Every structure is written in C-alpha cells, then in structure tokens.
Image (cartoon, rainbow, N blue to C red):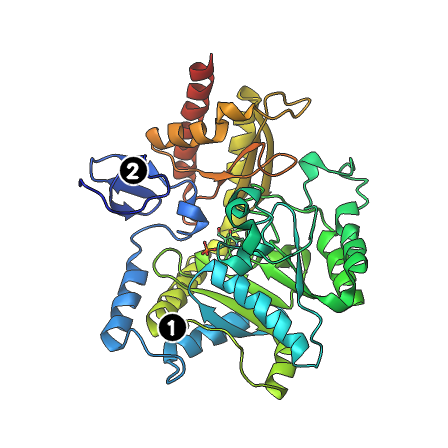
Amino acid sequence: MDPSYLIKPLLDETYPVIDYGKGVYLFDMDGNDYLDGSSGAITANIGHGTKEIIQAAAQQAEKVSFVYRSQFTSEAAEKLALKLAELAKGELNWSFFVNSGSEATETAMKIAIQYWQEQGVFTKTKILSRWISYHGITLGALSMSGHKGRRARFMPLLEDCPVLPPPYCYRCPYDEIEGSCQYSCAHELDLLIKRIGPEHIAAFIAEPIVGAAGAALTPPKDYYKIIKEICKKHGVLFIADEVMTGFGRTGKMFAAEHWDAAPDIVALGKGMGAGYTAIAAALVSDSVMEPILKGSKSIMSGHTLSANPQSCAVSLAVLDYLEKNDLVKQAEKKGIYLINLLRKLQISFPFIGDIRGKGLMIGLEFVQDPTKKTVFPREMLFTQRLISTAQKNGLLLYPAGAGEDGIHGDAIIIAPPLTITEPEMDDLGKRLEKTFQMMITDSS
Ligand code: PLP
C-alpha cells in the first residue's frame, strides 16, 4: 500500500493494515491476529463486526442518514435522548449530541458557563480541573486537561483552568494511606475555590476514574461525596467526564454511580458509538436546563453532524445490545476475573507496581523497584516498548500516564470489549505473560 499520504500518529512508523474484526480479535492483511485488549482506545466496547449494529446502521441508512438539526429532529435522535434520560440516574434528562469526546467536554464547559449567564452572573467563567486528567484535544477541552505532554505545544493558546491533585492512592501526594485516608486531595478543592473566588468559577470537571493521563486512578469511597459537598457549598457545578468510563465500561452504566456522585452535566463519547460511528453527548440536568429554558432557550453550541439519525440509530442499537446481553453487569464480574489473573502475573513480574480500576477498565503501573516505587529511567521507554512488544505478540494495550507528574512513569490500561469470554481473557493473560517475559529477556 505504498506510497502512503495518510497522516499517521508517528509518521516514521509502519502500521499493520487492518483487514477485518470479529468479536475481540482484529485481523490484518498479512493474516496476523490481535486480541483487542484495549478496545482500541477504550472504544470498541461490544467487540468488532457485531451483526445487530451493522443491521441497525443499514436500516437507518435506507431511511435517512442525515438531517440538519436546525431543520429537523428524527425518530432515532428522539429515542436516544429518551433512552439516555431513562438510564441516567437523578435528573440528567437532557441530551445534546456531538461527534467526539472532546466536543462533549467542551460543550459541557460552555453549558456550565451559559447556565450562570442566563441567571445574570457573568463572572463565573472558570472551569476547575485536576492535574493528571484528559478531557480532549480541542483547545477548550485541552485547557481543562492536565495532560502535560498533550498541552505543551499549545500552552499560549490555552485558557487558565486551575487544577488540584487527583486521587492517586498509589502515590498519595499527602502520604495518606488506605483505611485512614483524610481525603486531603478532595478537601483541596475547597481551598482552590476560596483562593480563586467562587464568583469566578462555573464548574469543576473530573473523570470519575482517570483514564489516559492516569491509568485508571480510582478514588476511595467518600471522595465524590466530599467533592459534591464542596461544589454545592460554593455554587460550583460538577461535570463528570464519562467519555471513557460511560456506557458500562466500569460495571455501571455510568461510573459516577459507584460513588453516587450525581453530576450536573455528564460528557459521553467512545462507548456510545462503540467504534461503529462517531457520536458523543453532553447530558444535562433539569436544574441546569431550567434557567436556559426560561432565558435564551437555546444552547450556544453545536456541530453540523450533531444528532444525525445515522449515528443516533447506531448508538441506540449499542444500548440495546448492552442490555440484551447484560454486558454492564458482566463487566463487573469479568473485571474481577481479569484482575485475579493479573495479580497472579504480578507475583512473577514484580515490576507490576499497582493494579487498579473498576470493571473492565484496569490500570497497571510499572516500577523499577516495587518497594520504593521508583519509576524506570525515561530513556528506557518502558511503556512504548511494552506496547510494541505486545502488538508483535498479537495483543493490543493502551498506553497511559503515570508517575508523580503524570509523565515520568509507566502505565497501561487493559480494557477489552465487554463481550470478552473467560477463555479469551485467559488468552489475553498468556499473550501478556509472553510480553512481560520478553521485556525481561530484552533488557538483560
Ligand atoms: N475525555 C476523556 C476522559 C477521554 O478519555 C477522551 C479521549 O481519550 C476525551 C475526553 C476526548 O475524546 P475524543 O478523543 O473522542 O475527542
């Protein structure tokens, strides 16, 4: 397939050319198979080549694929909004559809600011976030992201979104330990809001479980209770970025449910189309919509393809498939199976420093010395080598940030499609074990 004019992530790399996918496996044009241990970028949540989704897409395409949202609504878009209102707990009853996770978080950001403006408050424009977070690549979404590597080149263009430390229990910046945790990282939000002044702050955004930037950083039990109380006390909205965690990935339809976090706005993406289409959304609560409905009656955002019937029909079919196959509940059980398997590997490979996450969103953090938790020297490129060795062994893994600053550490996310079976998880374990073994042999 030469010459290639496709702009790829690394222009001097050659990438296998994919032929087709079936279930949890992908097959390239040379006949190699890959177990999709990361669902791509934690996206192909129901596996590849699912007939029901393909049929739903074809049926919708036969009727109509696109209508412009300022001229028409559609049965598929209306049904999807209704279904999401049913599935989301509390008063998250309104959906604004977009096409990517970055658009979803940026829309959430804009809705939060508009919410205050509709009530005559024009100073509340800042969004608070967390150091070690990723909310997307567009400039608004990137402004909210603490992902140093992805921000670096565009720093002069980014908005100021003050950050607090994430709940990183493996490397707690406050040296607190599980069981006697004082939740200093959550209480820091109170200080941050006071320092900046609540009159300037529209919302606080957080991934319920930190994904790309932190390899499944999972907060302890009362974290979001404290966060919610602080937000409420200061009149700050809480946005949950569920782009990676939403749609069943962690064993609940939305990960915020694990902590009863009751967000005011939720950003969704990835699993919403499960890789079969580009669709994402901001779910908005009744209370946030109320002043907008009484005021300007319009949300100042939107994209040409927002709420297109084709993507909405696919997302509805994905939801239907999740429900019919009970995949959300299964994600919890399968997650336990996979974590047990990984814990066994940890005995033979002590460079696995930490195993964390919920359901089928599992983070592994790697360390040179498990007692001291020292990171590998950067020039070793541990994660990069691990990912490419795994791919050569037919296993796809997702690289993630780690370490005190979120970049000088090594970590991956393991997040296979929720459809994975026990024998397939065993296969994943075998391919991973072979990869770990090769990492040791190669560096000795
Ligand atoms: N938010 C989170 C939590 C993500 O993980 C991502 C992507 O990895 C995004 C937002 C951005 O989504 P997209 O890449 O679809 O723009």
Which residue is drawn at the image coordinates 50% and 70% (left, top)? Answer: 84
Which residue is drawn at the image coordinates 70% and 39% (left, top)? Answer: 169
Judging from the image, what secondary structure is the residue with disc 1 in?
loop
- In the rendered image, residue 439, in percent from the top left (x then y), is placed at 45, 21
Whole-Å distance between the Cαs marked 1 and 2?
32 Å
Where, by quadrant of the figure, is residue 280 drawn?
bottom left
Seen in the image, is 52 located left or right of residue 219?
left
- In the rendered image, residue 29, in percent from the top left (x then y), is placed at 20, 39
Return the residue nearer the eye: 134 or 362: 134
Residue 304: image tag? 1
**Amino acid at the residue labelled 1:** Thr
* Above or below: residue 83 compared with residue 206: below
Seen in the image, is 108 located left or right of residue 121?
left
Q: Say few, some or many: other residues with alpha carbon within 10 Å of mark 1 (under 14 / 14 to 19 / 20 or more).
A: few
Return the residue nearer the eye: 367 or 253: 367
Q: Is residue 102 visible?
A: yes
Return the residue nearer the eye: 153 or 273: 153
| Mark 1 lies within 8 Å of ligand 1 (Cβ measured) | no
Residue 15: image tag? 2
Q: Is residue 91 visible?
A: no
Judging from the image, what secondary structure is the residue with disc 2 in?
loop
**Amino acid at the residue labelled 2:** Tyr
